Amino acid sequence: MPNPLISDRELAFLLDEVLDLHAVLAWPAFAEHDRASVEAYLDACRRLAREALWPSYRAIDAEPPVFRDGRVHVHPRLSELWPKLRELGIIGATRPVAVGGQALPLTVSLAAQLYLMAGNLSAYGYAGLTSGAGHLVEVFGSAELRARYLPQMYEGRWTGTMALTEPHAGSSLADLTTVAVPAGDHYLLTGAKIFISGGDHDLAENIVHMVLARIVGAPPGVRGISLFLVPARRPEGDRLVPNDVRVTGLIHKIGWRGIPSLALSFGDEGDCRGWLVGEPHRGLTYMFQMMNEARIMIGANGVATASVGYHESLAYARERPQGRPADARADATRPQIPIIEHADVRRMLLRQKAIVEGGLGLVLHAARLADASEHAPTAEEQARARRQLDLLTPIVKTFPAERGFEANALALQIHGGYGYSSEYVPEALLRDQKLNTIHEGTSGIQGLDLLGRKAMAEGGLALRELIADVEAVCARAATAGVDEAWAAALREASATVGGLTAALGARGLGGDVAGMLLHSADYLELCSIWVIGWQWLAQAAVARAALAAGRGEARGDAGFYEGKLAAAQYWLRTELPRIPHLAALCRDAEDSYARMRPDWF
C-alpha cells in the first residue's frame, strides 16, 4: 500500500471532532466556504501530494540544485511540479479574494498543505516563502508596491524570500550591517546575506527579497532596522532588468535539498534598488509577521515529515517477518511473525504515533487560533486568541521539529539495517527533519522567547488563560468517562507550570535574569510535554465519547478510537512524570554548564 503521507481519517478527526471546523466556517469571513468545498480543496492537495510530489521526492533529494553560469538551477522535476502547485492557489489560499486569494481559513489551508509538505517539503517551500513575503507586501507595503508585486507573487509567477541573516551575525539581528542609502523614490542597498532559502532558481521569472537593512544614520540595534522590498530583477517599463543582486555561494545541505540555500550580495556595483516597506526603523516588527507565520510552517513541516516516517515504518513493520513470539523463540518450526508483533516495535510505533498525532493537533490548534485572532465574532475573543497564539508559537515550532526528529529516528530504527541505507526513505526524512530544529530560530532561541517574553507577557495573562483551557479539557474528559488519573496528572502538571513560571518571573524581577533563563531549554521542554498532554487528553475525551455513543462501531472504525486512547495513555503516563524533574532543574538554577569555563572543555 502506498504511503498515505498524512492519515485522511486522522485529519478528519481533528478538524471535525476536535477543532469543530463547522464553527469556524460559520464566521462571516468564510461565508463562501462549506464543508463540501473544504473537502474538495483537501482532496486536490492530497492527490497532488500522493500522485506527483511524493513520487518525485527521492529524485529531487538525490540531485540538489547546482550553481552554473551565474544562476542556480534546480531539479528539472520541480519545473513540472511548480505549475501544479500554482494551479492549486496555495500561495494566497488564506488571503482575501480582492487580492487574488481564496479566503480559506488557515485551519483548512494548513491541513491541506500538510499533505504537500509531507509529499515534498522542498517543493512546497517555494510556495510557503512566497506566501509569507506576499503577506508582508499586502499588509505593510504602499499601494504602488502592492499593485506592482502582489498579483505576480500570489499567482506564483514571482517567488519571495525573507533575507535576514548575515554571515557575521547569525541570529543576532541587532548586529546586521546591510546599509540602505536614500536615492529618490528608492534606496540603494549594500550588504551580504546568508542561508537565504529559494534566493535564486529557475522556476520563476523573478524573485522578491524581503530584506532587513539599516538606513544610513539609523539608531543602533534592532531599533534601527527597516524592511525593504528588493527584487532580483526590477521592473522597468514592460521588462525586468538585473537589480545588482548576486549569488556568492550555494550551501550544500543535508536536507531540504530541493530548495537552494544561498549566500547573496546586494549592491556590488552600487545599483541594488530597494523600496521601503512601511515606516523606517520598524522593519523587525513587520518581519515578525512573516517569521511567526514561518514558525508555524516549520512546525507543520516537522509534523508532516514525522508523519511520513511513521507511516513508512508502520507499513514495514506489518510486512517484515522476523523472529517468533517471546514464548516460542526456541521453536524454529514455527513461522516467523511480522515485527509489529514484537512489543518493542509496537513501543516505537506508539511513540511515533503519540508525537505525530499530538503534534498534528497542536499545529492545527495554532491555525485555528490564527483564524480566531482575525475573524472570531468579538474583539475580546480575537485578543485572547492572539495572546494564545503568541504564547504557543515557540512550542508549535519546536516540539514537532525536536520530537519529530526523534520520531524519524525511530522510523529508521524499525527498518533495522535497511533504515540507514539510501535505498530506503527513512534516512532522507531524518536529514530533512534536522533542519527544522534550526530553521526560523533554533530551539534554544525558542526557549528564551517562551520563558523570557511570551510566558511573562501582561503579567502572565496568556499562561493563565492556557491553564484555564487545560482545565476545561480536564472537565470534558471527566464528563466523557476518561480515566480520572489522566486528568489529575494533567492538572498537577498545570500547577507545576504555573508555580514555576511565577517563581522564575520573580527571580528575573529581582535582578537575576541570567538565573531565570538558565534552564530555558528545560522550561520549553516541560511546557511542550504539558501542552501535548493537553492535546492528547482533548483527543481522548472525544474518542471515549465516540465509543460510548457507538459511533466507532457504526462507522466500522472503533479501533481508531481505541488507538487514540492507547496513545493518550502512553503520553500522559510516560511523559508527564518528567515535568517535576525538569521543573526542579529550572527552579534550582542547576549550574553545571553555567559554571563550566570554556577552557575546561
Image (cartoon, grey):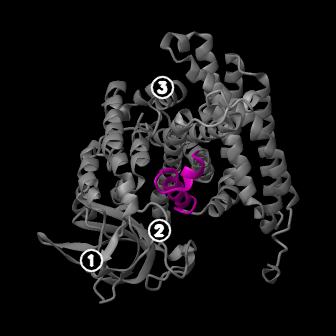
Q: Which residue is mark 1?
A: 185
Helix, strand or loop for the magenta stretch, by majority: helix
User: From the image, which quarter does the N terminus lie in?
Assistant: top left
Q: Provide the residue span drawn in magenta.
A: 415-440
Q: Which residue reaches farthest bottom?
A: 269
Residue type beneath disc 3: Asp
Ranked by sequence position, the earlier of labels 1 and 2 is 1
Residue 102 picture location, percent across and down: 30, 41
Q: Nearer the viewer, mark 1 or mark 2?
A: 2
Q: Secondary structure at mark 3?
A: helix
Q: Residues within 10 Å of mark 2 (few under 14, many from 20)?
A: some
Q: Residue at x 71, y 51 (%)?
A: 525
Residue type beneath disc 2: Lys
Residue 67 picture location, percent across and down: 32, 76
In depth, the one of 217 and 151 nearer the eye is: 151
Q: Residue at x 55, y 15 (%)?
A: 552
Q: Secondary structure at mark 1?
A: loop
- Give the answer, above or below, for where 99 lies relative to 214: above
Residue type beneath disc 1: Asp
Residue 366 at least partly seen: no
- Name the mark on residue 16: 3
Residue 576 picture location, percent across and down: 76, 40
Q: Which residue is mark 2?
A: 253
Marks 1/2: CA distance?
38 Å
Q: Is residue 456 left or right of residue 113?
A: right
Marks 2/3: CA distance?
39 Å
Q: Residues within 10 Å of mark 3 (few under 14, many from 20)?
A: few
Is there CB contact under 8 Å for labels 1 and 2?
A: no
Ranked by sequence position, the earlier of labels 3 and 1 is 3
